[in-house]
Amino acid sequence: MGRRAALAALVCAGAAGFVPGAGASAEASARASATPGAAAARAAATAGPHPPASLLGDEIRRLPTSRKALALTFNAAWDDAGVDTVLAELRRRKLPATFFPTGEFAEAEPAAVRAVADAGHGLGNHSYSHPYFDDLSTAERADEVRAADAAVRKASGTEPLPLFRFPYSSTTPESIADVNALGYAAIEFSADTNGYLGPEGGMSVDRAVRRAVEAFAPGAIIQMHVGSHGDGVVLDAEALPLIIDAALADGYEVIDLRRFLEA
């Protein structure tokens, strides 16, 4: 089965848990309406969280607050080598984070996604197969978002957040509008630690921490990763305690992105 066919199958399988937001295109809405279980899905979606208008219309790289507060976020697109370490540290500190898994990650590592949900952290959407959205049509973008939603929903057993993070942080006004129309805010980041590059990519724990600390500001969103690219070294998992120490020492509160869905 080709990737497009696989995506279509996933969309159909997960349709009972997802429909486009009120601003979805007529074409997308028609596809959802034609899917078995669409009426139930629409009812379920109405009860779920929706991003406020303040988070729509552009990519969000800093949260709308003047307080000394920042958010910790983790992408998950490769292996789960750092998940246990990250969750243990967050549990020890009693701090929240938001995780953005791809659909492929959710299918390959469902236990990791369920562990994140069971720990009480939010799960966003990082696309199904991590493509450049610039290269996709509106329909293809919708397929990626829906297939990821279905996979994350199945793996976690919870309602994913209406927060989307673009693969490679590659955004355009058109792709942001498409994601917004599906009911998602485009949540990017103030700084990426670049820990995902690993030692072979010239990174170290100290460098990852420094990149995060240099971005501290009211509303900062720090991006990290839970994977190792297969070498077993997850610099972001090692850097996390030091980043938290630096944030707290500087008077910052680590906040949950879900607060901004209540506006």
Image (cartoon, grey):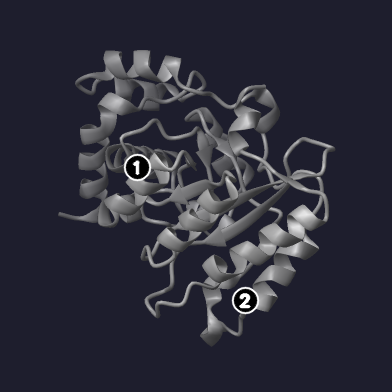
Would residue 214 be found to the left or right of residue 228 on screen? right
Residue drawn at the location 28% of the way across and 15% of the way down = 40
In the depicted structure, whether residue 39 falls above or below residue 191: above
Residue 71 percent location from the top left of the image: 66, 46
Image mark for residue 123: none
**Where's residue 164, x and y in %?**
52, 42
Quadrant of image for the N terminus: bottom left
Distance Cα–Cα, label 1 vs label 2: 29 Å
Q: Position of residue 161 (x, y in %)?
A: 48, 34
Report whether 11 appears left or right of 117. left
226 relative to 69, above or below: below
Q: Is residue 22 left or right of residue 246?
A: left
SS for callout 2: helix
The residue that mark 1 highlights is: 152
Residue corresponding to mark 2 = 205
Between 14 and 212, the one nearer to me in the picture: 212
In the image, 33 versus 228, the foreground residue is: 228
